[in-house]
C-alpha cells in the first residue's frame, strides 16, 4: 500500500508539471491602466482605463461635483500622439459614466481624462494611469 500511494503521488506530480509545461504561450497583453481619484475644493473625480484586446475602455466617476458645474467631459487621449480621440459630455450628476469602447492603435499609450467646467473655467480634472495597448 505504501508503494501504491507513492506511485500515485509521483504520477500526480508528473501530471502537474506536464500541465504547466504544455500550456501554450499567451498573446501580448496591454499593460498599465487602472484608476486615479483626484479631490479638490471643486469636486472629487475618478478616471479609469482598461483594455480588452484591441479595445480601450475609458470610464469615469463623478463622486462630488461643485455647485457651479455646468458640464463634465470624459476624454480618451492618445498619449503617443497627444490627440483626444474620444470625448463625451456627461453632465454634472454624480455617478459612473462608461465604459466607452474605442478601438486603439497597437503600441500606443492612452489615458482617460475626466474634467468638469463652469461657464468661466475648468473646475477639476483627473487623469487615469497610462495604458499601453498591446494586442
Image (cartoon, rainbow, N blue to C red):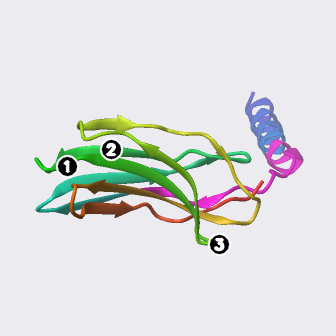
Q: CA separation, marks 3 and 1? A: 30 Å
119 to the left or right of 23: left
Q: Which quadrant: the N terminus?
A: top right
* Residue 105: percent from left, percent from top: 74, 58
Residue 41 lies within the magenta run? no
Closer to viewer: mark 3 or mark 1: 1
* Residue 90: percent from left, percent from top: 37, 39
| Residue that badge 1 annotates | 69
Closer to viewer: mark 2 or mark 1: 1
Q: Secondary structure at mark 1?
A: loop
Q: Secondary structure at mark 3?
A: loop
Question: In the image, is residue 46 above or below residue 98?
Answer: below
**At 27% from the left edge and 44% from the top edge, which residue is drawn?**
62
Residue 25 lies within the magenta run? yes
User: Tag on residue 80?
Assistant: 3
| Residue that badge 2 annotates | 61
Q: CA separation, marks 2 and 1? A: 15 Å
Residue lying at the far front of the rendered structure: 119
Q: Which residues are magenta?
A: 17-35
User: Tag on residue 38?
Assistant: none
Answer whether labels 2 and 1 touch (C-beta < 8 Å).
Answer: no
User: Which badge, 2 or 1, comes first in the chain's sequence?
Assistant: 2
Amino acid at each position: 500500500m505504501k508503494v501504491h500511494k507513492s506511485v500515485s503521488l509521483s504520477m500526480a506530480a508528473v501530471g502537474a508539471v506536464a500541465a504547466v509545461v504544455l500550456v501554450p504561450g499567451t498573446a501580448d497583453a496591454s499593460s498599465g491602466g487602472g484608476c486615479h481619484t483626484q479631490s479638490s475644493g471643486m469636486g472629487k473625480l475618478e478616471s479609469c482605463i482598461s483594455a480588452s484586446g484591441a479595445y480601450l475602455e475609458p470610464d469615469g466617476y463623478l463622486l462630488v461635483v461643485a455647485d457651479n458645474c455646468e458640464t463634465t467631459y470624459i476624454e480618451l487621449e492618445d498619449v503617443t500622439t497627444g490627440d483626444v480621440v474620444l470625448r463625451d459630455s456627461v453632465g454634472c450628476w454624480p455617478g459612473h459614466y462608461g465604459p466607452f469602447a474605442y478601438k486603439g492603435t497597437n503600441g500606443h499609450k492612452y489615458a482617460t481624462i475626466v474634467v468638469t467646467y463652469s461657464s468661466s473655467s475648468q473646475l477639476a480634472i483627473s487623469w487615469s494611469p497610462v495604458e499601453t495597448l498591446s494586442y
